[in-house]
Amino acid sequence: MLRGHHRGRTLGIGTDLWAYWDEFRAGRIGECEMARLECGLARSPGHCMTMGTASTMTAAAEALGMALPGSSSIPAVDSAHHRTAAASGARAVALVREQLTPAEVMTREAFADAAATVLALGRLHQRTDPPDRAGRAGGVKFSLEDFDAIGRGVPVLADVRPVGAFLREDFSYAGGLPALLAQLARVPEVLHPDRPTVTGEPFASHYRGADIHHPQVIRTPEDPVSAEGGVLVRISDARMSGTSYGTCVLHVAPESHVGGRTGDPVTLDVPGRVLRMEVDDAELERRRAGRRPPPPRFERGYGSLYAAHITQADEGCDFDFLAQPGRNPEPDPS
Protein backbone atom coordinates (compact mmCIF):
# COMPACT_ATOMS: atom_id res chain seq x y z
CA MET A 1 0.00 0.00 0.00
CA LEU A 2 0.97 3.65 -0.28
CA ARG A 3 3.16 5.22 2.38
CA GLY A 4 1.39 6.55 5.46
CA HIS A 5 1.18 10.18 6.54
CA HIS A 6 0.29 11.71 9.92
CA ARG A 7 0.97 15.25 11.19
CA GLY A 8 3.77 15.83 8.70
CA ARG A 9 5.45 12.46 9.29
CA THR A 10 5.85 9.59 6.86
CA LEU A 11 4.71 6.40 8.55
CA GLY A 12 4.96 2.68 7.92
CA ILE A 13 2.08 0.48 9.01
CA GLY A 14 3.03 -2.05 11.63
CA THR A 15 6.39 -0.59 12.62
CA ASP A 16 5.05 2.86 13.51
CA LEU A 17 1.73 1.46 14.67
CA TRP A 18 3.48 -0.55 17.41
CA ALA A 19 5.35 2.54 18.57
CA TYR A 20 2.17 4.63 18.74
CA TRP A 21 0.31 1.76 20.40
CA ASP A 22 2.89 1.79 23.19
CA GLU A 23 2.35 5.54 23.54
CA PHE A 24 -1.41 4.96 23.73
CA ARG A 25 -1.08 2.26 26.38
CA ALA A 26 1.18 4.56 28.40
CA GLY A 27 -1.49 7.27 28.30
CA ARG A 28 0.59 9.75 26.33
CA ILE A 29 -1.85 9.92 23.41
CA GLY A 30 -5.63 9.45 23.38
CA GLU A 31 -8.24 7.57 21.35
CA CYS A 32 -8.87 10.46 18.95
CA GLU A 33 -5.20 10.66 18.08
CA MET A 34 -5.08 6.89 17.50
CA ALA A 35 -8.11 7.12 15.19
CA ARG A 36 -6.44 9.85 13.12
CA LEU A 37 -3.27 7.82 13.01
CA GLU A 38 -5.09 4.75 11.70
CA CYS A 39 -6.63 6.81 8.88
CA GLY A 40 -3.21 8.10 7.93
CA LEU A 41 -1.55 4.69 8.02
CA ALA A 42 -3.84 2.62 5.79
CA ARG A 43 -4.34 4.83 2.72
CA SER A 44 -4.80 2.29 -0.04
CA PRO A 45 -5.26 -1.41 -0.84
CA GLY A 46 -2.24 -3.63 -0.47
CA HIS A 47 -0.08 -5.22 2.20
CA CYS A 48 2.28 -3.46 4.61
CA MET A 49 4.35 -0.71 3.06
CA THR A 50 7.24 -1.71 5.31
CA MET A 51 9.41 -4.73 4.54
CA GLY A 52 7.08 -7.03 6.47
CA THR A 53 6.09 -10.64 5.95
CA ALA A 54 4.20 -10.20 2.66
CA SER A 55 6.87 -8.01 1.05
CA THR A 56 9.60 -10.36 2.16
CA MET A 57 7.84 -13.42 0.75
CA THR A 58 7.14 -11.81 -2.62
CA ALA A 59 10.80 -10.83 -2.84
CA ALA A 60 11.80 -14.39 -1.95
CA ALA A 61 9.52 -15.76 -4.69
CA GLU A 62 11.12 -13.47 -7.26
CA ALA A 63 14.62 -14.38 -6.06
CA LEU A 64 13.73 -18.07 -6.31
CA GLY A 65 13.02 -17.48 -9.98
CA MET A 66 9.31 -18.21 -9.57
CA ALA A 67 8.06 -14.71 -10.47
CA LEU A 68 8.68 -12.26 -13.30
CA PRO A 69 11.56 -9.79 -12.82
CA GLY A 70 10.51 -6.72 -10.84
CA SER A 71 7.05 -8.05 -10.05
CA SER A 72 7.56 -8.22 -6.27
CA SER A 73 8.35 -4.51 -5.88
CA ILE A 74 5.27 -2.90 -7.45
CA PRO A 75 2.93 -0.92 -5.14
CA ALA A 76 -0.58 -2.39 -5.07
CA VAL A 77 -2.30 0.59 -6.69
CA ASP A 78 0.30 1.11 -9.43
CA SER A 79 -0.90 0.41 -12.98
CA ALA A 80 2.18 -1.76 -13.50
CA HIS A 81 0.42 -4.37 -11.36
CA HIS A 82 -2.18 -4.94 -14.08
CA ARG A 83 0.46 -5.22 -16.78
CA THR A 84 2.49 -7.65 -14.67
CA ALA A 85 -0.60 -9.74 -13.93
CA ALA A 86 -1.31 -10.09 -17.63
CA ALA A 87 2.30 -10.95 -18.40
CA SER A 88 2.37 -13.50 -15.57
CA GLY A 89 -0.76 -15.19 -16.88
CA ALA A 90 0.65 -15.41 -20.37
CA ARG A 91 3.90 -16.82 -19.03
CA ALA A 92 2.04 -19.42 -16.94
CA VAL A 93 0.38 -20.75 -20.10
CA ALA A 94 3.75 -20.86 -21.85
CA LEU A 95 5.25 -22.82 -18.94
CA VAL A 96 2.69 -25.55 -19.46
CA ARG A 97 3.53 -25.75 -23.15
CA GLU A 98 7.26 -25.79 -22.41
CA GLN A 99 6.80 -28.35 -19.62
CA LEU A 100 9.04 -26.33 -17.31
CA THR A 101 8.16 -27.45 -13.78
CA PRO A 102 8.70 -25.81 -10.36
CA ALA A 103 11.09 -28.60 -9.40
CA GLU A 104 13.42 -27.53 -12.22
CA VAL A 105 13.42 -23.94 -10.97
CA MET A 106 13.40 -24.36 -7.19
CA THR A 107 16.81 -25.97 -6.80
CA ARG A 108 19.12 -25.73 -3.81
CA GLU A 109 20.92 -22.87 -5.58
CA ALA A 110 17.59 -21.05 -5.95
CA PHE A 111 16.86 -21.35 -2.22
CA ALA A 112 20.37 -20.12 -1.44
CA ASP A 113 19.77 -17.06 -3.63
CA ALA A 114 16.39 -16.43 -2.00
CA ALA A 115 18.01 -16.59 1.44
CA ALA A 116 20.77 -14.21 0.37
CA THR A 117 18.20 -11.80 -1.07
CA VAL A 118 16.09 -11.74 2.08
CA LEU A 119 19.25 -11.20 4.13
CA ALA A 120 20.21 -8.29 1.90
CA LEU A 121 16.76 -6.86 2.63
CA GLY A 122 17.52 -7.19 6.35
CA ARG A 123 14.54 -9.47 6.96
CA LEU A 124 15.65 -13.08 7.54
CA HIS A 125 14.63 -13.10 11.22
CA GLN A 126 11.06 -13.84 10.22
CA ARG A 127 11.47 -15.91 7.10
CA THR A 128 13.50 -19.01 7.76
CA ASP A 129 10.55 -21.37 8.08
CA PRO A 130 8.62 -20.84 4.78
CA PRO A 131 11.67 -21.35 2.51
CA ASP A 132 12.64 -24.35 4.62
CA ARG A 133 9.08 -25.67 4.29
CA ALA A 134 8.98 -25.13 0.54
CA GLY A 135 12.39 -26.70 0.14
CA ARG A 136 11.43 -29.81 2.07
CA ALA A 137 8.26 -30.20 0.01
CA GLY A 138 10.43 -30.14 -3.10
CA GLY A 139 13.04 -32.49 -1.70
CA VAL A 140 15.59 -29.73 -0.99
CA LYS A 141 17.11 -29.72 2.51
CA PHE A 142 17.93 -26.19 3.67
CA SER A 143 18.81 -25.76 7.34
CA LEU A 144 19.19 -22.87 9.78
CA GLU A 145 22.94 -23.43 9.57
CA ASP A 146 22.73 -22.83 5.81
CA PHE A 147 20.91 -19.54 6.41
CA ASP A 148 23.51 -18.46 8.95
CA ALA A 149 26.46 -19.38 6.73
CA ILE A 150 25.01 -17.33 3.86
CA GLY A 151 24.27 -14.43 6.23
CA ARG A 152 27.90 -14.07 7.22
CA GLY A 153 28.81 -13.12 3.66
CA VAL A 154 25.81 -10.99 2.67
CA PRO A 155 25.59 -7.26 3.45
CA VAL A 156 22.27 -5.54 4.13
CA LEU A 157 21.67 -3.34 1.08
CA ALA A 158 18.08 -2.10 1.59
CA ASP A 159 17.56 0.81 3.98
CA VAL A 160 13.88 -0.04 4.43
CA ARG A 161 11.75 -0.19 7.58
CA PRO A 162 11.49 -1.78 10.05
CA VAL A 163 15.29 -1.98 10.15
CA GLY A 164 15.89 1.10 7.98
CA ALA A 165 14.54 4.55 7.17
CA PHE A 166 12.50 4.19 3.97
CA LEU A 167 9.37 2.34 2.83
CA ARG A 168 8.51 -0.21 0.16
CA GLU A 169 7.16 2.45 -2.17
CA ASP A 170 10.55 4.17 -2.02
CA PHE A 171 12.23 0.81 -2.66
CA SER A 172 10.14 0.32 -5.80
CA TYR A 173 10.99 3.72 -7.23
CA ALA A 174 14.66 3.25 -6.31
CA GLY A 175 14.83 0.32 -8.74
CA GLY A 176 13.10 -2.46 -6.85
CA LEU A 177 14.43 -5.95 -6.41
CA PRO A 178 16.30 -6.08 -9.76
CA ALA A 179 18.43 -3.12 -8.64
CA LEU A 180 19.17 -4.76 -5.30
CA LEU A 181 20.03 -8.07 -6.99
CA ALA A 182 22.38 -6.29 -9.38
CA GLN A 183 24.33 -4.97 -6.39
CA LEU A 184 24.18 -8.27 -4.54
CA ALA A 185 25.62 -9.97 -7.63
CA ARG A 186 28.75 -7.87 -7.14
CA VAL A 187 29.44 -9.69 -3.87
CA PRO A 188 31.65 -12.67 -4.80
CA GLU A 189 30.15 -16.16 -4.70
CA VAL A 190 26.74 -15.19 -3.36
CA LEU A 191 24.29 -15.54 -6.26
CA HIS A 192 24.02 -18.30 -8.86
CA PRO A 193 23.50 -16.39 -12.13
CA ASP A 194 23.14 -19.33 -14.50
CA ARG A 195 20.32 -21.27 -12.82
CA PRO A 196 16.91 -21.54 -14.57
CA THR A 197 13.87 -19.39 -13.84
CA VAL A 198 10.22 -19.31 -14.91
CA THR A 199 11.04 -16.81 -17.64
CA GLY A 200 13.06 -19.50 -19.43
CA GLU A 201 16.11 -17.28 -19.07
CA PRO A 202 18.95 -17.62 -16.54
CA PHE A 203 18.65 -15.81 -13.23
CA ALA A 204 21.22 -13.17 -14.23
CA SER A 205 18.81 -11.84 -16.88
CA HIS A 206 16.46 -10.77 -14.06
CA TYR A 207 18.87 -8.12 -12.80
CA ARG A 208 21.51 -7.53 -15.46
CA GLY A 209 21.79 -3.78 -16.18
CA ALA A 210 19.35 -2.75 -13.42
CA ASP A 211 20.21 0.70 -12.06
CA ILE A 212 19.77 2.30 -8.65
CA HIS A 213 17.68 5.49 -8.81
CA HIS A 214 17.88 6.37 -5.10
CA PRO A 215 21.25 5.38 -3.61
CA GLN A 216 20.10 6.07 -0.04
CA VAL A 217 17.37 3.41 -0.35
CA ILE A 218 19.31 0.70 -2.18
CA ARG A 219 22.96 0.67 -1.22
CA THR A 220 26.06 -0.70 -2.89
CA PRO A 221 28.34 -3.35 -1.32
CA GLU A 222 30.85 -0.56 -0.67
CA ASP A 223 28.27 1.43 1.36
CA PRO A 224 25.95 -1.14 2.98
CA VAL A 225 23.42 -0.58 5.73
CA SER A 226 25.37 -3.21 7.68
CA ALA A 227 28.21 -5.51 6.79
CA GLU A 228 26.23 -8.74 7.20
CA GLY A 229 22.67 -9.92 7.54
CA GLY A 230 21.51 -11.70 10.66
CA VAL A 231 19.18 -14.51 11.64
CA LEU A 232 18.73 -13.29 15.27
CA VAL A 233 16.31 -10.54 15.77
CA ARG A 234 11.91 -11.40 22.39
CA ILE A 235 12.73 -14.98 22.94
CA SER A 236 9.62 -16.95 22.07
CA ASP A 237 8.41 -20.17 20.51
CA ALA A 238 5.55 -18.24 18.92
CA ARG A 239 5.03 -15.87 16.01
CA MET A 240 4.97 -12.09 15.70
CA SER A 241 4.37 -9.45 13.08
CA GLY A 242 7.05 -9.16 10.44
CA THR A 243 6.91 -5.38 10.91
CA SER A 244 8.08 -5.55 14.53
CA TYR A 245 11.45 -4.13 15.49
CA GLY A 246 14.04 -4.39 18.24
CA THR A 247 16.02 -7.40 19.41
CA CYS A 248 13.96 -10.57 19.55
CA VAL A 249 14.51 -14.28 19.07
CA LEU A 250 11.62 -16.12 17.51
CA HIS A 251 10.55 -19.59 16.52
CA VAL A 252 12.46 -21.31 19.32
CA ALA A 253 12.20 -25.09 18.95
CA PRO A 254 10.94 -27.31 20.36
CA GLU A 255 7.92 -25.25 21.41
CA SER A 256 6.77 -25.18 25.04
CA HIS A 257 3.70 -27.31 24.28
CA VAL A 258 5.91 -30.36 23.85
CA GLY A 259 7.80 -29.92 27.10
CA GLY A 260 9.12 -26.42 27.61
CA ARG A 261 8.57 -24.01 30.48
CA THR A 262 9.05 -20.33 31.29
CA GLY A 263 11.31 -18.69 33.85
CA ASP A 264 14.66 -20.33 33.07
CA PRO A 265 17.69 -18.06 32.50
CA VAL A 266 18.92 -17.90 28.91
CA THR A 267 22.25 -16.81 27.47
CA LEU A 268 22.13 -15.00 24.11
CA ASP A 269 25.39 -14.22 22.33
CA VAL A 270 24.70 -12.91 18.83
CA PRO A 271 28.31 -12.69 17.53
CA GLY A 272 29.02 -16.13 18.95
CA ARG A 273 25.78 -17.57 17.56
CA VAL A 274 24.85 -18.93 21.01
CA LEU A 275 21.35 -19.31 22.40
CA ARG A 276 21.57 -21.53 25.50
CA MET A 277 19.20 -22.33 28.35
CA GLU A 278 21.19 -22.27 31.57
CA VAL A 279 19.78 -25.49 33.05
CA ASP A 280 22.03 -28.48 33.65
CA ASP A 281 21.47 -31.89 32.09
CA ALA A 282 20.45 -33.52 35.37
CA GLU A 283 17.63 -31.06 35.88
CA LEU A 284 16.46 -31.46 32.30
CA GLU A 285 16.40 -35.23 32.70
CA ARG A 286 14.43 -34.88 35.95
CA ARG A 287 11.88 -32.73 34.14
CA ARG A 288 11.56 -35.19 31.28
CA ALA A 289 10.99 -38.08 33.66
CA GLY A 290 8.25 -36.23 35.51
CA ARG A 291 6.52 -34.71 32.52
CA ARG A 292 2.95 -35.69 31.72
CA PRO A 293 1.80 -34.61 28.23
CA PRO A 294 -1.34 -32.46 28.27
CA PRO A 295 -4.54 -34.08 26.97
CA PRO A 296 -5.23 -33.42 23.28
CA ARG A 297 -7.31 -30.32 22.68
CA PHE A 298 -8.83 -31.79 19.52
CA GLU A 299 -9.77 -35.45 19.12
CA ARG A 300 -10.90 -35.33 15.49
CA GLY A 301 -10.90 -33.13 12.42
CA TYR A 302 -8.28 -30.66 11.28
CA GLY A 303 -7.15 -29.77 14.80
CA SER A 304 -6.29 -33.39 15.50
CA LEU A 305 -4.51 -33.76 12.15
CA TYR A 306 -2.48 -30.62 12.79
CA ALA A 307 -1.40 -31.65 16.30
CA ALA A 308 -0.35 -35.10 15.14
CA HIS A 309 1.63 -34.12 12.05
CA ILE A 310 2.92 -30.54 12.27
CA THR A 311 6.70 -30.20 12.58
CA GLN A 312 8.67 -27.83 14.79
CA ALA A 313 9.95 -24.45 13.62
CA ASP A 314 13.42 -25.71 12.76
CA GLU A 315 11.78 -28.18 10.36
CA GLY A 316 9.53 -25.66 8.63
CA CYS A 317 6.28 -25.74 10.69
CA ASP A 318 4.77 -27.94 8.01
CA PHE A 319 2.89 -31.24 7.85
CA ASP A 320 5.42 -34.04 8.01
CA PHE A 321 3.68 -36.02 5.26
CA LEU A 322 4.15 -33.16 2.76
CA ALA A 323 7.92 -33.42 3.00
CA GLN A 324 8.22 -37.19 2.76
CA PRO A 325 9.83 -38.60 -0.40
CA GLY A 326 7.79 -40.02 -3.24
CA ARG A 327 5.81 -39.05 -6.30
CA ASN A 328 2.16 -38.39 -7.02
CA PRO A 329 0.46 -39.28 -10.31
CA GLU A 330 0.10 -36.54 -12.88
CA PRO A 331 -3.48 -35.38 -13.60
CA ASP A 332 -5.25 -37.31 -16.36
CA PRO A 333 -5.42 -34.89 -19.34
CA SER A 334 -8.56 -36.63 -20.59
Image (cartoon, grey):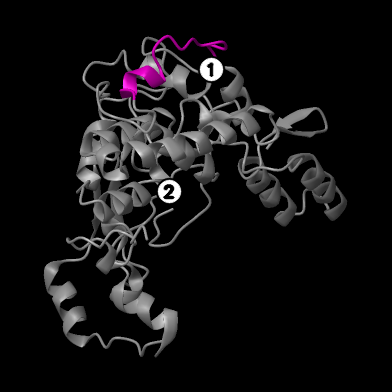
In the shown orientation, is residue 174 left or right of residue 224?
right
What amino acid is at disc 2?
A: Cys
Nearer the observer, 162 or 269: 162
In the image, farthest residue toward the right: 32
Q: Residue at x 33, y 24 (%)?
A: 203
What amino acid is at disc 1?
A: Gly
Crowding at dot 2, Cα within 10 Å, few <14 / some 14-19 / many 20+, comes out as: few
Q: The residue tagged with tag 2: helix, strand or loop? A: loop
In the shown orientation, is residue 16 left or right of residue 120?
right
Q: Which quadrant of the structure image shows residue 43?
A: top right
Residue that badge 2 annotates: 248
Seen in the picture, residue 282 relative to 194 is either above or below; the reply is below
In magenta, the rendered stretch is 201-217
Q: Which quadrant of the structure image shows residue 293?
A: bottom left
Whether residue 301 can be seen here: yes
Residue 316 in the image: x percent, y percent?
31, 57
Total numbered labels: 2
Q: Which quadrant of the structure image shows residue 92?
A: top left
In the shown orientation, is residue 50 left or right of residue 115?
right
Seen in the picture, residue 146 relative to 304 is either above or below; the reply is above
Asked if the stretch drawn in magenta spans residue 104, the answer is no
Q: Could you give the CA–CA distance between mark 1 and mark 2, rounded to whole angstroms?
A: 30 Å
